[in-house]
Amino acid sequence: MSASDADRPPPWSRLRQDVGAVVWSSFLAACLAAMLFFAAFDPLTLASDDNPPWWLESRMTGYSVGFFFFWFVCAVAGFLTSALLHSSAGAGQRGD
């Protein structure tokens, strides 16, 4: 074993690779979705009723809640896609 092999971290498992890919791609998609959504809508006008909830009284809170909502939706879509891809790949390997 050479010195460069000893310094290398162990390879990632397939699950770890999938989680990393889904989390990173959903983060980037949520960034784009939040930019496009909040370019058209102001969080304060979305909560423009007479008594907005206490957590939506500032614009930054609205941006944060919106971003995490988009990230959650994109992550769910990514995990479902990953699960469907792996289930169809497994079915083809069994000879179905």
Image (cartoon, rainbow, N blue to C red):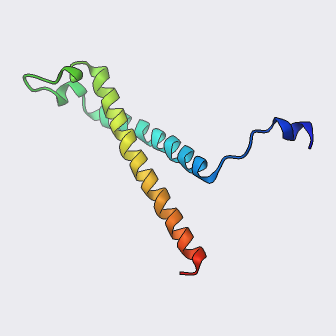
The answer to which quarter of the image holds residue 71 is: top left
Vertical position of residue 8 compared to residue 93: above or below: above
- x 58%, y 77%: residue: 94
Vertical position of residue 51 compared to residue 83: above or below: above
Horizontally, residue 20 falls left or right of residue 35, namely right
Horizontally, residue 20 falls left or right of residue 47, namely right
Quadrant including the N terminus: top right
- x 36%, y 34%: residue: 68
Picture coordinates of residue 23 (x, y %)? 50, 42
Picture coordinates of residue 12 (x, y %)? 67, 46
- x 92%, y 41%: residue: 2
Picture coordinates of residue 5 (x, y %)? 85, 41
The answer to which quarter of the image holds residue 64 is: top left
Say how many tags the image has: 0
- x 39%, y 49%: residue: 76
Vertical position of residue 77 compared to residue 46: above or below: below
The answer to which quarter of the image holds residue 70 is: top left
Vertical position of residue 83 compared to residue 5: above or below: below
Toward the bottom, the furthest residue is: 96
